Image: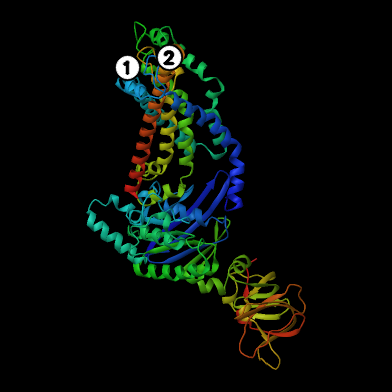
Amino acid sequence: MLRNSDSARGLTLISPPLLYAVLMLAGPLGMILMFSFVPQSDGPNTLITLQNYTEALGDPLYRQLIIRSLLISAAATAITVLLAFPIAYFISFYVPPKRKSLWLFLITIPFWTSYLIRIFLWKVILGLNGLLNTGLLKLGLINEPLEFILYNPAAVVITLAHAFAPFAILPIFVALEKIDRSLLEASQDLGESKVRTFFRVTLPLAVPGVVASVLIVFIPTVGDYVTPRLVGGSEGTMIANMIQVQFLRLDNRPMGATLSVITMICVTIISLLFVLANRRNMKART
Amino acid sequence: MTMITLDGVEKYYGDYRALRGINLTIGEGEFFSLLGPSGCGKTTLLRTIAGFEDVTTGAVTIDGKTMTNVPANKRPTNMVFQSYAIFPHLNVAENVAFGLRRRRDLNKKAKNTLVEDALDMVGLDGFGDRAAHALSGGQRQRVALARALILKPKVLLLDEPLSALDKKLREQMQSELRRLQRQVGITFILVTHDQEEALIMSDRIAVMFEGQIAQLANPQTLYRRPINRKVGEFIGVMNTLPAQVKIAVGARVSVDVAGLGPVMLTPDQCPSGAKTGETHVGIRPETMAILFDGETSDGNIANGMIHELAYYGDMTYYDVKLDGIERPVTISMKNLVGRPVLERGQRTRVRWDERSLVLFKE
């Protein structure tokens, strides 16, 4: 069946992780998909049904939660990538080569504590008696503690942006590292200033890294569950919280599964559109 | 007319002295080469002219204007980079047009015409739509040339532009660069470590060692009258023989050369201020000749033994151990019709001409 031994060896090499991935990822995914077609307890007495989907898409609450999740995630992605770019740029262009790995290592330090603890820390910072409010009160900049900074979508965006920053920095850093420095000199030699060189050479060549960063942050944050639960309040609740409620509290597996599938489809479509738009953009310029 | 003046240029990287007191003037329309082994500072010197490195002390003047504190993008120079630095996200025409953005006086059509002319000039007409990654090494170099020349610089800087090409293509590009330089009539400054390339292409060559210019001369002078042993051995093949200067008074320089005997040299063959004492003389392989059986000569004859030989097809290079010296001398002989190729260990006579000797400064 296999035409040459090279591909056979390759397949042999990846077969253990492939098997693991299929069992652990595709299996549950298939089950979710299956559940989404199973009738709810008060649903029709058939083996499979589309009622879950009509209900999920018809209910304004679900729709609102999905849209909110996408918006919060998009905002978090935008902020993360915008903040990550200068950091990646700094490490790639201004840190001496010997120190680069040290800097990358420092960036991973937040991962040394658990995700949960980091979110609690943000609660401490943003809370009513938190670091930010006390600080501003002591400085006399405000008279009453600010209430709008915790338990709302903004708090979710801030917390997500912080948690995902390292993921965004690395792909951009890699793209910047790959840029031949003589290209930047060539641009200056041809009469462009350093700023112009950035926009005409550095940025276009960093686009693949930026696209990767956007996807790496956007895709997981849409389905984030812990952050909105802890700092989101009722206004910052996202679709994953509803899925959790459906599965664990209401024991409504079919609806939880349906919402999961719809969210996945939304994320896939948006990501594909983003990638395609970028590819067309790149083609238009070359 | 002078185009570039370097006045006491020094460059330090920390404690490392990369350029040492460089004084140099390069004329308008000159094809000038900086030649030297890697690490001799030739590329650093080129980059100080381009504006990518600032000088520690001294001054660079281009076309009468001093370039201190003038950044690379404001200098009337353009560069062809060793890696060619073709922008991978742009196609050929966009690469060539890159520097035209600032020409507000030109409309799109005029710019397109300029791009087409520039591509035409380097033999890439019709390649405008090609993607950068679809180009061969030689084509990339032509794009880099067109991209620089389209801006009509006063000086074109070339940083080892041919080192990445194979031999055939390199030779073709050498003559093409020469033709281009005559066509546009501007100053070309070429950095190279290839002495043959420098000899073929340049009007003048500066040979650099350890951040200093060792000799500045035209190709013929450089080849025939290298100033010291190091330059002589760097340019082509040079036989170096120990020698003793017996008399050095005015025009009379009498030298005793090991293996060849006593000779009288003209001032032309000696460094200025030659003194008596131990030194070396140089002699090129092609200025000596093996005397084959029956051949006679009224010139100077030395006797020796074939130590080693290398057959090149058109030429044979013999290493001959002359009687009285340990180190063999190399002699190149054309393989003419009826001329045999000698064998190792054979005794032979060597004809040499004292006019081809050059006395080195120690």
The subunit carrying tag 1 is A
Q: Is residue B105 above or below residue A129?
A: below
- Residue type marked 2: Val
| Mark 2 residue element | helix
- Residue type marked 1: Leu
Q: Residues within 10 Å of mark 1 (few under 14, many from 20)?
A: few
Labels 2 and 1 share a subunit: yes
Q: Which mark is residue A61?
A: 1
Residue A13 visible? The answer is yes
Q: Is residue B288 left or right of residue B60?
A: right
Q: Is residue B257 left or right of residue B28?
A: right
Report the quarter where the N terminus of chain B lies.
Answer: bottom left
Q: Position of residue A111 (x, y in %)?
A: 54, 24
**Residue for badge 2:** A245
Q: Nearer the viewer, residue A118 or B311?
A: A118
> Quarter of the image holding residue B61?
bottom left
Q: Position of residue B230 (x, y in %)?
A: 62, 65
The colour scheme is rainbow
Q: Nearer the viewer, residue A100 or A70?
A: A70
Q: Residue at x 68, y 93 (%)?
A: B296
| Mark 1 residue element | helix
Q: Is residue B135 above or below residue A212?
A: below
